[in-house]
Image (cartoon, rainbow, N blue to C red):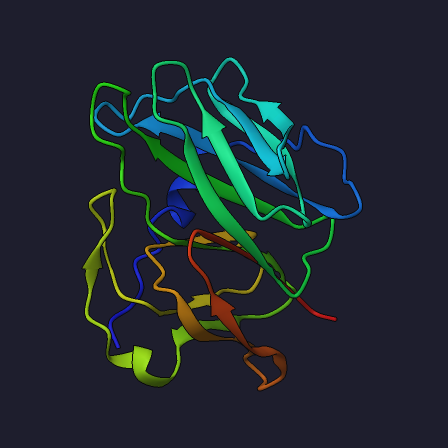
Amino acid sequence: MPTFLLCFALYWMGNIDHQSETIQTPGAIQVSGHCFDITTAAYLPIEAFTMSGTDKIALGHSDKDGTFFLQLPLSATSVSFASKGYHTVTLPVSFVNKPSPKAEFRLGIIMSKQDSATAQQTNQLLISNDLPSSGTVSYLVEPTGSMTSLPLLKTAHGNRVSPGGRLRIEKGRTLPQINFEGAIPGPYRIAALMDNGQVLVDKKFTVTEGLTFMEVRID
């Protein structure tokens, strides 16, 4: 199977010097990232919110550099990003295995101006890792069942991706967040194994439409 291009994972790790600006809140996860113009790639000032019935619940604003730090409640079923002069982006959200309050996720959202067509969003699998750095870890995310034969696709950001991937995290290194942009909804498996054969995680889960948040931790 072709290796999954970790579209945003390395980008966000290299471009956000993340100093958490949020307080860990029970029943919520920490989400940081940028929204940017689909044609110019310029970071945009945004406000983020979710809905509870007909009530709009503010989640926060981006800072002067266009970076946002949000507390997203686990009760949320969608999240919206609004910027003046741009189409508001609303995406459904789901959570795998109830991420803990210390889980942190990084997100990138494209936006288009109101006088142009609405930017087509791709589904994203966002993973927060809590893995040991005392040894080398083999890390695998792959689709299961009939999805294993799915072809490559091209995301809204121009990246060609397949629906699964494999990598090694060398001793002393960490990979706190991964964003699988373009993940195709359906059943998946994630596995993390130490070099000595110890199984850290081996779990089946489902990616849904929109944003799927998952924390990989050693329980």
Q: Would residue 174 be seen by someone viewing this image from the given angle?
A: no
Residue at image coords 27%, 21%:
113
Asked if residue 95 lies left or right of residue 42, the reply is right
Asked if residue 121 lies left or right of residue 48, the reply is left
Asked which quadrant contains residue 142, the reply is bottom left
The one of 82 and 35 positioned closer to us in this rendering: 82
Asked which quadrant contains residue 184, the reply is bottom left
Please say if 93 is above or below 108: below
Residue occupying the far right of the picture: 26
Position of residue 109 measured from the top left corner of the image (x, y, whole percent):
39, 36
Residue at image coords 55%, 64%:
171
Quadrant into which the N terminus falls: bottom left
Position of residue 215 measured from the top left corner of the image (x, y, whole percent):
62, 60
Q: Would residue 209 be seen by someone viewing this image from the given angle?
A: yes
Residue at image coords 45%, 17%:
45
Asked which quadrant contains residue 53, the reply is top right
How many numbered marks have been drawn onto this rendered protein structure? 0
Position of residue 199 measured from the top left corner of the image (x, y, whole percent):
61, 82
Quadrant into which the C terminus falls: bottom right
Residue at image coords 42%, 57%:
209
Please say if 209 is above or below 197: above
